[in-house]
Amino acid sequence: MSTPTPPQAAPVPMQQQAPAQWQGAPAATYTSPIPIRSTHLGHALASEWTKIRSVRSTMWTLSVMFVLVLGIGLLTAIGFSSSSYAEIPLLSGGLFGLMLGQICIVTLGVLVITSEYGTGMIRTTMTACPARGRVLAAKAIVFFSLSFVMTLVATTLTALMQSAMLGGQSPGEFTTLPEESIVNGEVIATTSEWVDATVGASLYVALLGLLALAIGAILRHSAGAITTMLAVILLPMLLALFMQMESLRDLQEALVEYSPLNGLATLYQLPFMGDEGSGSGWGLLGILACVTVGALVGAFALTHKRDV
Amino acid sequence: MIEAVGLTKRYGAKTAVYNLSFQVRPGAVTGFLGPNGSGKSTTMRMILGLDNPTAGHVTIAGHPYRKLPNAPRQVGALLDAKAVHGGRHARNHLLCLAQLSGIPARRVDEVLGVVGLQDVAKKRSKGFSLGMGQRLGIAAALLGDPQVLLFDEPVNGLDPEGILWVRNLMKALAAEGRTVFVSSHLMSEMALTADHLIVIGRGQLLADMSVRDFISANSADFARVRTPDTEPAAREKLSAALTEAGGHVLPEADGALRVTGLALPRISDLAHDSDVRLWELSPHQASLEEAYMRMTQGAVDYRSTIDQKAGLQQQLPPPQAQFQAPVPGQGQPGWYAPPPPQQGGQPFGMPQGAPVQPGAPVQPGAPAPQGAPVHNPYAQPADVPAAPVAAPPAPTAAPPAAPAPAAAPDLTKSENNENGAAR
């Protein structure tokens, strides 16, 4: 044996003594003085909140997201402010930072679940709460709320920055901006543009993160899930780039229109393709929500059925 | 009370646990023993509802784990010391588990004190040693102050003080009327801790009995008798006398005799009667470890083989030489001792002159003392490519390069080599 034991003589007398000693132990079973309450989703939510705030990956991914969204937003605003004509809608500069920032949210979404599988913590968690669906639901709710609030703060700050720095610009001579965005010869942002660029964009990114969490719960592997999510976000655009043949035109357009990047761009009034006139990305957001719910249902079913 | 009935788990073609039925009762420490890979951890996971059994079922207090109301308040488990997120510090790890089962947060500080981790409560568990990890795992198991406790290899990585602490903790928990189920592959540890044993091998139940029954059922006490090594005849004589008196005599590898079925005074009397002097007469009790080894030897999945270093070692002396130099007074069997040193022997019979002379690599400069050719499979591949190139210069080049005492075997070998090349 690898672990040292006290003197070699000890085992023999102990073996013979021990049973006699312990058979006399009280036969009555033990009852804990700590009151036993029935548990519910609220307990799981508190637990998941403790978990998500007590690891560094949360701090890191959210900090990087803030730096990217605000930093690139600022650089964009500085770049556009040198021109006296507005080249894009007032709040659209926030898109470029958020396109990178969403990767952080997606990474965090994957890590929230796969880090438990990777470390084995999931077995401890599932032992402490055999209702596996409750654990997954609590994770989804806590992560979605956190990422939505954080993204909302970042996008709102960026939108305010854009509006403050570019507010005085006049529309160019051949502007394609809608009429309601031009007041007294200055470019402004309408209420719906404000909502799209803050609440809409944050909801979109948080949903993408939730989809990442569901994929993470299905694949149970950090690298695999992050790669899958990056492919979901980037591949449609990349594939479309190489589909220049006439016969594939329809497929190319569909790929661009329904790519997650286009959904975000549409919310910022800069669609790559598709419903340019309507200028609303809420349709694509609805599609993303449906896909996410589908993935979550799959994740729930698998988590319930599989061995941990 | 844990009750398993016909528990079976298959992973693809491999059956990890087969038709396992047992009961674990409250008020005692029940040891769960088996060699590596015998299905202990799989069984533990099935008890905790983490893995679904392929067949059969297991219940705790009459309910399957996943149907237990507030399970962590009734069952605490340490499965794997490293089953924590390393980036989270110890207190938060326990806090999130406490919150999950509605346990007040001050209980976290209590269990941290119980396992002695209060000073590192705010340290990330990534930096914990295996022993500290075990303590953290035990803290998590104790968190709910449960009636049933499961520990999978709890003493792994603990220092002697920690092992003693775990041992006493288990006993104290059982004495309070709790059900304590501890798995281990260390029989010696279980001998000190457990009251009852469940032994499995290759996923099947081998024994389910109290520690005392286990020892008496699986071991036999014996006496070691050693006669003077200088008188082999005396050994034969005593052996015959003991057998005649109804004893069972087994020769041991170092020349002693293992006698069962006779009391020590009787052996002494018999020796006296047959006029044989004794150098040793000692009582031996088979330990729990031996009983366990005997029971599980057919069920060990991972068994090491002897590192033969085939062809790398000089030939051992003939087997008769083994009994020539026993050490009187040393009762321990000698078969673990290294082989006696050999004169002129090289630990590794690799060709010494190989890089210098292409004709010579066939045989090292120092041949075996017996003069027998040393069979060295590792040297063979080197000869084959060397031979065609070396064939023409060999007759002239080899003799001067070879050391004088080894000239003769060298020549015969290089001739062989030439023959091989000519074919």
Image (cartoon, coloured by chain):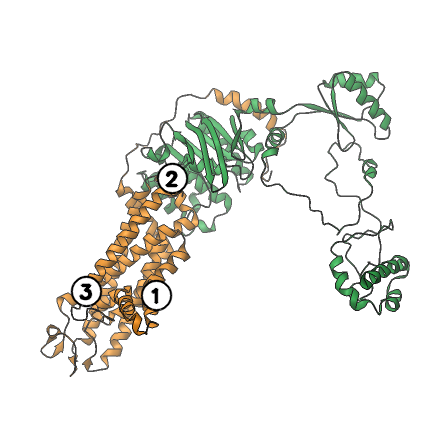
x%, y% of residue A253? 27, 69
x%, y% of residue B308? 71, 47
The tint chain B carries is: green
Q: Is residue A214 left or right of residue B194?
A: left
Q: Residue furthest front?
A: A247
Q: Earlier in the sequence, mark 3 or mark 1?
A: 3
Location of the N terminus of chain B by quadrant is top left
Q: Which residue is mark 1?
A: A235
Q: Residues within 10 Å of mark 2 (few under 14, many from 20)?
A: many
Chain of the residue on which disc 3 is drawn: A
Q: Is residue A228 left or right of residue A180?
A: right
The answer to whether residue A69 is visible is no
Gap in angstroms between the C-alphas marked 3 and 1: 25 Å
Gap in angstroms between the C-alphas marked 1 and 2: 39 Å
Asked where in the image residue B79 lies, by quadrant, the reply is top left
Q: Is residue A139 left or right of residue A165?
A: right
Q: Residues within 10 Å of mark 3 (few under 14, many from 20)?
A: many
Q: Which residue is mark 3?
A: A196
Asked where in the image residue B176 lies, by quadrant, the reply is top left
x%, y% of residue B91? 38, 45
Badge nearest the viewer, 1 or 2: 1
Tell me the orange chain.
Answer: A
Gap in angstroms between the C-alphas marked 2 and 3: 42 Å
Residue A127: image tag: 2
Three-letter code for the amino acid on which mark 2 is drawn: Thr
**Mark 3, secondary structure of its residue:** helix
